[in-house]
Amino acid sequence: MMSRHSQQKQLIGIAILVAALAVIPFFANSFMLSVMIMIGLYAIVTSGLTMLMGYAGQISLGHAAFYGIGAYSAAIVTGTYGLPSILGILAGIMIASAIAVIIGIPTLKLKENYLALATLGFGIIIFVFFKEFKSLTGGLNGFFGIPSFELFGFSFNTDMKFYYLVWLILLLSILFSSNIIHSRVGRALRSIHGSDIAANSIGVNIQQYKLKVFVLSAIYASIAGSLYAHYVSFINPELFTAMESINLLIMVVIGGSSSIWGGMIGAIVYVLLNEGLKDIVPAILPSVGGEFQIIFFGILLVVILIYMPQGLAPVLGKLWNLIPFGRKKDRPSIEKKNEPKVSAGGSK
């Protein structure tokens, strides 16, 4: 349980983060705003994955599929049928939830590598669906003409407006996840992560909790996908491949699956490094193609797993706790004037 001082420092940290996020658009150019939007979208997905992996101990390599389901649901509902944007997001949530239940019931009985392979196979099936059902999704030619996101008549048609929308949803997602993790459900998930047998012995319905957190993580991915479709106004099946699921997994590992903030931290590090490598690598090695980025993140993943297996979030948390503000200084004890002094050998 956190001490009062730790809780105060955490609230101060959140307040500083919110204040920084509020002023960033006034100092950032359009490119930096687009980068921050992509960080926010990825962080929404990884927040759900953090609960699934870090707290329930279930590895998924198919979450790009749920990301794509949200994107195509929003695109079809708003682009093809001209319905309100919120209905597109709700359609994505319902479809992703239903598929997560259908897929989760059999696959979540598997463990470790078998579960990862099963979810990977699911992701590949969904990718093939996006590619082959051209009349519905546009196939590899893509889906064009997705309108801007609108809510109650207000259009998020600029990068600044969309930036605030995405990061507000992300912070609400993290807050919701935090409430779950610190509740009875969170304790049940941690017990499952520790040992299925031990959790079952104390009356935890293992399959039910695994399925619930799997569905919730799918909903997070679907919402992010719907927002992504409205932001870029064009989607293509190549955006939702198995490699994208692996990239999401890398973000969670980099940030730290044991912390609810790990998904956001991992998304920040991944996107900033990815954008930096696009400029730095061609300048140093002109003949090297995009495969260098895959190699770089593979090496980074190995280093993180060896030297920081809990990810960056705990390290940053320790650094934050070293900052001394808000700590009460110990008061020097005041010696009573009238109290007689006693020597080591006894009283005089």
Image (cartoon, rainbow, N blue to C red):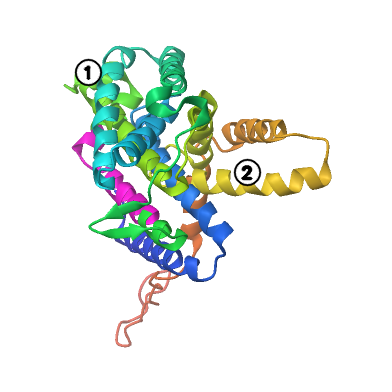
What residue sits right under mark 1 in the picture?
200
Whether 122 is drawn above or below 312: the answer is: above
Instruction: Give the residues in magenta.
Output: 166-187
**Which of the 4 image quadrants contains residue 116?**
top left
Residue 158 is left or right of residue 191, and the answer is: right
What residue sits right under mark 2 in the picture?
274
**Which quadrant holds the C terminus?**
bottom left
Residue 290 is left or right of residue 229, and the answer is: right
Q: Distance from label 2 to label 1 (Cα)? A: 42 Å
The answer to whether any part of residue 254 appears in the image is yes
Q: Amino acid at mark 1?
A: Asn
Q: Residue at x 38, y 61 (%)?
A: 14
Report the magenta stretch's main SS.
Answer: helix
Tell me the SS state at disc 2: helix
Task: Return the residue found at the far left.
Answer: 203
Front residue of this view, candidates 266 and 310: 266
Q: Amino acid at mark 2?
A: Asn
Residue 204 location, x and y as percent? 19, 23
Q: Residue at x 39, y 70 (%)?
A: 326
Q: Residue at x 36, y 56 (%)?
A: 165
Mark earlier in primary sequence (2, 1): 1
Residue 158 location, x and y as percent? 44, 60
Residue 194 is left or right of residue 124, and the answer is: left
The answer to whether any part of residue 51 appears in the image is no
> Which mark's residue is nearer the viewer, 2 or 1?
2
Task: Assess whether residue 97 is covered by the magenta stretch.
Answer: no
Tell me the SS state at disc 1: helix
Residue 21 location, x and y as percent? 44, 63
Task: Assess whether residue 171 is covered by the magenta stretch.
Answer: yes
